[in-house]
Image (tube, rainbow, N blue to C red):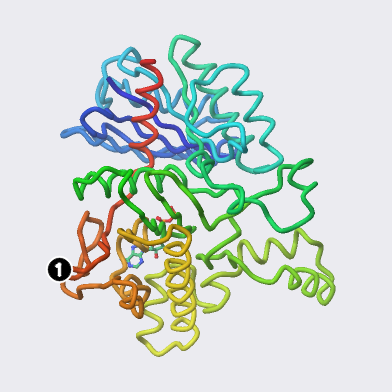
Amino acid sequence: MNILVINAGSSSLKYQLMNPETGALLAKGLCERIGIDGKFTYKPQVEGKEKLDAIDVAMPTHSEAIQTVLNALVDEKNGVIASMDEIEAVGHRVVHGGESFASSVLIDDAVMAAIEECTPLAPLHNPANIIGIEACKAVLGDKVPQVAVFDTAFHQTMPEHAYIYAVPYEYYENDKIRRYGFHGTSHRYVSKRAAEILGKDPAELKIVSCHLGNGSSLAAVSGGRCVDTSMGMTPLAGLPMGTRAGDMDAGVVEFIANKYGYTVSETLNILNKKSGVLGVSGVSSDFRDLESAFKEGNHRAGLALDIFAYRVRKMIAEYAAAMGGVDVVLFTAGVGENSAGTRADILKGLEFMGITCDAEKNKVRGEERIISKDGAPVTVMVVPTNEELMIAMDTMEIARG
Ligand code: ADP
């Protein structure tokens, strides 16, 4: 049976229809500009079915968007299923589960209320996720189970000393201000997959999982449980990213705000959208552009790449220390899966910890592959992420009770 995976944003909705038992992807696509002028993309993955790219599709709300998706999936000519009955359940990516959710759950009224309660922690994302769930309910009714899979849930096993910020404790008690972490579904999927590839029990492994994409985070996964991660209460923390600054002196916020007359929100907008490798290079947030610019002699593009590699390298060692050792370092997401150069730069200088990079094996893109030298103490590997598959697997398991 098939699972519909939904990732709803405020004016967009990504979807995939897949069978988690076989791993087969039947169709995927995107609704964009919901409430504006509706753009709809449908990419069937079945032989002989044609894709669709439509503009000016009437999608005043997410409900019409979901209906458009379902119509395409069951379309007589280019659909991939005969009827809605072939959708067993719907899995929703939900960004923030706060301290209420340490795993995926079947959605009911109490769960909806708890997701709503987490809204102050993710004011842009959670309301959009709620709208997506409500739209599915409106279109599919109560018969189709719906499951919420949280970006934060995997990190709920962190110990107190890893998640409590060193600010007055009442901010945690009163406002739940603490480290939560994101990309949890990805870190969980790739760390589980790494253990499978190596034929090991996850309980035996200490893994540093490097999710390096447009947004980047590391997770320390010991015995299958997350013990630390680099993003914080918001995704701004940790590594420098495409456009996010990552960790820095909070005093800079006051300095910039005072000097340029910006509000705190305006200053944070700079740290979220204009910083990171884009801010340093002045070239792009895209690592491919930075690599080309550096080859053409652009110093700041090279500097941005150096800063990124340095910070990831330091954090790998930090997380090895957090776990009292490391067996596996894995790379995933856009940069981690595809950029051999960035991986090699990150790994340079970690040989003292038994972490190596075999230049030949490292020539890999988007495939599962061990890239450390033969016989090295630590296994370094590339493991492509698949958050949608993880969501579909959770959803099927929970829907079947
Ligand atoms: P998101 O966080 O938006 O999901 P992705 O995981 O898709 O991001 O990663 C996007 C990043 O991956 C971009 O910065 C892009 O430059 C980088 N990327 C994709 N392919 C390559 C490649 N071949 N070489 C270097 N970087 C790449």
CA neighbours of label 1 inside 10 A, class few (<14), some (14 to 19), many (20+): few
Decide: is 227 above or below 270: above
Residue 334, percent from left and from top: 36, 59
**Observer-nearest residue: 371 or 283?**
371
Residue at horizontal 35%, vertical 43%? Answer: 189
- Seen in the picture, residue 88 relative to 29 is either above or below; the reply is above
Residue 103, given in percent of the width and then of the height, sits at 48, 32
Among all residues in the image, which is located at the extreme top? 143
Front-most of residues 217 and 168: 168
* Screen quadrant of the N terminus: top left
Q: Secondary structure at mark 1?
A: loop
Residue at image point 71% right, 42% down:
176
Which quadrant does the C terminus fall into? Answer: top left
Image height check: is 384 above or below 375?
above
- Kindly identify the amino acid type of the residue bearing the numbered disc 1: Asp
| Left or right relative to 367: residue 189 | right
Q: Is residue 117 left or right of residue 308?
A: right
Q: In the displayed structure, would residue 84 be above or below residue 193? A: above
Q: Which residue is mark 1?
A: 374
Which residue is drawn at the image coordinates 22% and 54% (left, top)? Answer: 368
* Drawn side of residue 209 relative to residue 164, left or right: left
Q: Position of residue 317 (x, y in %)?
A: 43, 69
